[in-house]
Image (cartoon, grey):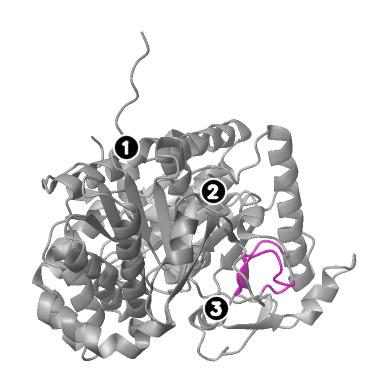
Amino acid sequence: MDTPEATPLFDRLFETSWEVCNKIGGIYTVLSTKAKTLQRLYKDKTIFIGPDVWTAETPSPWFTECRVHGLSGWASKAKLPEGVSVRVGRWEIPGRPIAVLVKFDGMYAVKNEFYGEMWNRYGVDSLHAYGDYDEGCAFAHAAGIVIESIVNTLGKDTDRTIAHFDEWTTGMGLLYVKWKLPHVGTVFTTHATSIGRSICGNNKPLYDYLKNYNGDQMARELNMEAKHSLEKAAAHQADCFTTVSEITAIECEQLLERRPDVVTPNGFERDFVPPTAKKFNEARAVAREKLLNAASSLTGLKFADDSFIVITSGRCEYRNKGLDVFLDVMNRLDSTKLRRNVIAFVMVPAWAKEPRADLKAAMGKKRKSRLEDPVITHRLNNPDSDPVINRIHGIGFKNSGISTDEVTMIYVPCYLNGNDGIFDKSYYDLLIGADATIFPSYYEPWGYTPLESVAFGVPTVTTSLSGFGQWILQAFDNYFEECGVNVIGRNDSNYDGVVESIAHSIEYLTCADDETLAKIHLAAIATADAASWTNFIKFYEIAYGIALSGKKQQVNINQ
């Protein structure tokens, strides 16, 4: 007898984010990798909604406009406000989910009226808004109208429909749906609280004083009232409130005054990793040749093929991402304890002006000579105020061209998208060539960068202040041979100890024999597999169930 198919959890899921078909940061990775699993489980029941910020001259490389059953017919007849329009198609990522891109220019004309409505209904204080607040809210308002139109045109009263909104930038959309479509279940995910990030960005201690912080008071102090007010309202009004790690759940409970119902850790897919050992080794060799050539071209030195390449990367948030720690670690390394010379790369996009012409020319030559200021690959628009280059010079990294005994420090202040002018390789195409990575974050709700690293089998060091680091501590024994990761305990008062511990970790890796390194490589890959969406999608399914039923529950990440 045939087994009947299980009833799908929902009939339609909308997920709205500024980063749908719009690659900016980590949320793009969350959504674009989760989509494949959602498509496998709920084929074409998910509709991603993103901003149409593209033009005919600069189209989105991740979106294809095409016919989608039902939605295309709706789009051709939809009566949307003036200045709001849509394009229906597919997001060009694994799974090719449905995407609707929304033009939202018309929402600016009615923003004051809308802000007044949101103040009266939900207490959102937009009075002191500035910067990107209006843009985020205009998009979210338009996205809410689009969801309302689709539901009213294609839906039924009995449909199990969920509207999921990511970050404060989409909070107005959630509140609009709560107002206009009360039967639709809502989910709000904060990937990092706006006020928590601001506290850290203003060099204030977050963790030792967290229990004494009041989110509303800090928002007034740091001129964050509008964003914080919106995020807090969305968190409280959502049928289900989620965040990505336990450390951020604690932050939400204190600063937003609502404990998330579910922790939904960020899963991953290893689709970008070469599928065979032969292709992997070939890609690694190409990456190492590029990285060693850049180091040699800057310094005039000939580096051994087994030079130890260590990388840090991510947003250029000097303190939050631990760039200060990374530079101090490289300065602290004891050359007497290193068995291989170390080349350290800081790969974070800054205000880059152009690739260095002298470096570009040198990389094409066999004979190398030391370049002026051989610690940076691109010219900067703001060298006097860039914290990374100033700290590199302040420490005294010179890449003197005299000996490879010293640590060679190289700053790559550009987006590694394949056409940076020096490497002309994507970040992933270079990451595969590393021997280790370091992500010593102070503020890191999850942390995709260490997860990307272990996906390539590259061992990584991170801290207990990252969500990924906390997951490692809960799920594995914390040492390289067990999981390919070393999590260093970090708090507001042990900076020097963190630097010392990470330095010891790198010294250990440079001395490890081939058998140990092979074991670490396999352990790292296994860790990435454990963090796949196949394993983590269950937490979102719990969130969806709560949104539809209204039944609140606390869910442990390791259940």
Look at the picture and state if 45 lies above or below 315. above
Looking at marks 3 and 1 on the same chain, the residue that comes earlier in the sequence is marked by 3
Residue 96, label in figure:
2
Q: Secondary structure at mark 2?
A: loop
Q: Secondary structure at mark 3?
A: loop
Image position, residue 301 (x, y; %): 78, 66
- Which residue: 29% across, 57% down? 163
Q: Main secondary structure of the magenta part?
A: loop
Q: CA distance from mark 3 to mark 1?
A: 35 Å
Q: Secondary structure at mark 1?
A: helix
The foreground one among 460 and 161 is 161
Q: Is residue 433 inside the magenta stretch?
A: no
Q: Is residue 334 visible?
A: yes
Decide if residue 122 is on the left or right side of residue 323.
Answer: left
Label 3 neighbour load within 10 Å: few <14, some 14-19, many 20+: many
Q: CA distance from mark 2 to mark 3?
A: 32 Å
Q: Which quadrant does the C terminus fall into?
A: top left
The foreground one among 546 and 492 is 546
Tag nearer the camera, 2 or 3: 2
Q: Is residue 412 inside the magenta stretch?
A: yes
Residue 475, label in figure:
1
* Residue at the disc numbered 3: 350
Q: Magenta residues?
A: 399-421
Tag nearer the camera, 1 or 2: 2
Residue 27, label in figure:
none
- Which residue: 43% across, 74% down? 317
The amino acid type of the residue labelled 1 equals: Ala
Q: Which quadrant does the N terminus fall into?
A: top left
Look at the picture and state if 190 lies above or below 138. above
The amino acid type of the residue labelled 2 equals: Arg
Look at the picture and state if 259 lies above or below 277. below
The amino acid type of the residue labelled 3 equals: Ala
